[in-house]
Image: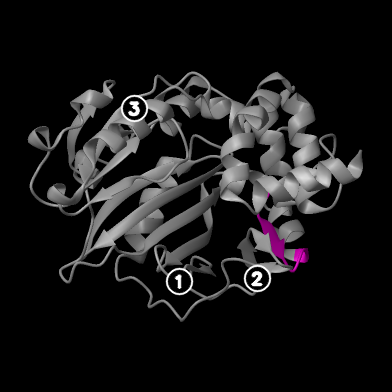
Amino acid sequence: MSSIRNIMKSFYHENSIGKLLLSPLIYYRNYIMSDKTYILKRFKRVMGYNLDLNNPRTLNEKIQWLKLYHNTPLHTQCADKYAVRDYVKNKIGEKYLVPLYLSTTDPKEITPERLPEFPFIIKTNHDSSGGIIVKDKTKINWIEIQQSLSRRLKKNYYHHSKEKQYKDIKPRIIVEKLLIDKVGNIPNDYKIHCFNGDPKIIQVDSDRFSNHKRNLYNANWELLPFTWSIWKNNKPVWDNGTTIPKPESLSTLIDLAKTLSKDFYYSRIDFYVVDKEIYFGEITFHHGGGTEIIFPKKWDSFYGDGLQIPINQG
C-alpha cells in the first residue's frame, strides 16, 4: 500500500499531467479531512517532526496553532485582497494603496476594452495565487484568461490550506496597476514579519520571476544567519542572494508595519518601494502555511520563543 502511495505522490509532484489529473482528488480529500488532522499530517510530512499543539515551541508550530485556534472577522477582511484596502486606508492612509482599475465578480468583464493601456496585474482576492501580469494587451489570449479566472473563482482556498481566514471571503477579480520602476523592472518586495506588533524579520525576495532569492534581515538591516524556505533535493529552494542595500525608507516601512500588525499576534506585512514611493502589498497570517523550513532549526525555536500566543485559550 505504501508503495502505491509513493508512486501516486511521485506522479503528482513530478509530472504536470499527474498534477492535473490528481488535483481534484486531492482537493476532495482535503475538503473532507478535518482541519486538525490535515495540519498534523502535513506538518509531520514536510517538517519531519510531530506538531505539538499543546505546547508549541517553534515559530512554525505557533503559526500552526494560530491557524487552528485564532481567527476573527478582521483576519478574513485582511486576507481579502480587496477588502483589506479599507483596513489599510483607515490605518495608514489611502496613499499607500496600489491604484485599482477594476473590480468584478464576472470573468467576462475582463476584456481589453475595459482595461488600461499601460501594464497591469489581474488577481483574485480570495486565494494565495500569483497574479496575471499584462504588459501588452494585444499579446494576450483573453478567452484563456477568463476561463482561468472562472476556475479560480469557484475554488475556496480554505479547503486547500485549512486557513480559516479564507473560508468566508467572497471571491472577486481585481485589476491593479503593475508596479515597475523607471527601467521597467518589478521591484523587490519587503515582507515584514511582526510578532505581537513588533517587526522582527524583514524578508526580501528578489528576482522572483527568474532566479528567485530570499534574504532575511533584522530591523537594523543586519543579514540573519538562516534560511526560511521550502526545500527540494535536501536544500532550500530560496537561498540567500546578493546583499540588498538598506532601503532609504526602512524606518517608515517599520513604522507602517507596526501600525498594520498591532491587531494580530503574528502577521507578515508586505510592501513595495518603487522609485522611493511606498505601496502596500498584502497581509499574510500564516507565512508559507507554517511549513517553510527555518534552517538551522535553532532559529525556528529562537523566534518561536519571541512570539507570545494565548495557548491556554486553545
Residue that badge 3 annotates: 83
Q: Can residue 86 be seen in this view?
A: no
Label 2 SS: loop
Residue range in magenta is 291-298
Label 1 SS: loop
The colour scheme used to paint the residues is one colour
Which residue sits at x=25%, y=67%?
185
Disc 1 from disc 3: Cα separation: 32 Å
Image disc number at residue 211? 1
- Classify mark 1: residues with Cα within 10 Å, few (<14), some (14-19) or many (20+): few
Q: Can residue 40 be seen in this view?
A: yes
In the picture shown, does residue 254 fall above or below 197? below
Q: What residue type is labelled 1?
A: Asn
Residue that badge 2 annotates: 226
- Classify mark 3: residues with Cα within 10 Å, few (<14), some (14-19) or many (20+): some
Which residue sits at x=64%, y=35%?
22
Quadrant where the image shows the C terminus? top right
In the image, residue 243 lies at what x, y percent? 45, 81
